[in-house]
Image (tube, grey):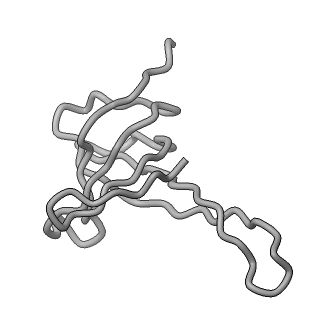
Amino acid sequence: MSDETTNGGRRQVRGRVTSDKMDKTVVVEVERTVKHPRYHKYIKHVRSFKAHDEDNSCKVNDMVVIEESRPLSRTKRWRVVQRLNQVEA
């Protein structure tokens, strides 16, 4: 689900919106799989990022692409680049 890419030195990751309760901010959960060094099993790692959503267009369960940016607030260092699909209410 993560699909980490670089765009001019800025990382882009894909994730799912888990909260849209804040104004112009969404919480995006990014999931990636990592192979354990000894047991060679794949483990799921999940991280949450706060991302800037200028238009308040993202809703819960939307898939989005977020990109690193300059610090926008104390905890916000990502911004929403595009919505991949949206959930019908």
Question: Which quadrant of the structure image shows residue 38?
Answer: bottom right
How many marks can you see? 0
Name the residue: 38% across, 29% down. Answer: 84
Image coords of residue 12 (percent x, y) = 31, 55
Residue positioned most to the top: 88
Task: Specify whether 20 is left or right of 51.
Answer: right
Task: Give above or below for 68 relative to 15.
Answer: below
Which of 36/55 is in front? 36
Image coords of residue 66 (percent x, y) = 31, 49
Which of 44/25 is in front? 44
Name the residue: 26% across, 54% down. Answer: 67
Residue positioned most to the right: 39
Question: Which quadrant of the structure image shows residue 65?
Answer: top left
Name the residue: 75% across, 78% down. Answer: 36
Question: Which quadrant of the structure image shows residue 6?
Answer: bottom left
Which of 62/13 is in front? 13
Name the residue: 63% across, 66% down. Answer: 45
Task: Specify whether 10 is left or right of 36.
Answer: left
Image coords of residue 69 (percent x, y) = 17, 63
Task: Give above or below for 86 relative to 54.
Answer: above
Image coords of residue 23 (percent x, y) = 25, 43
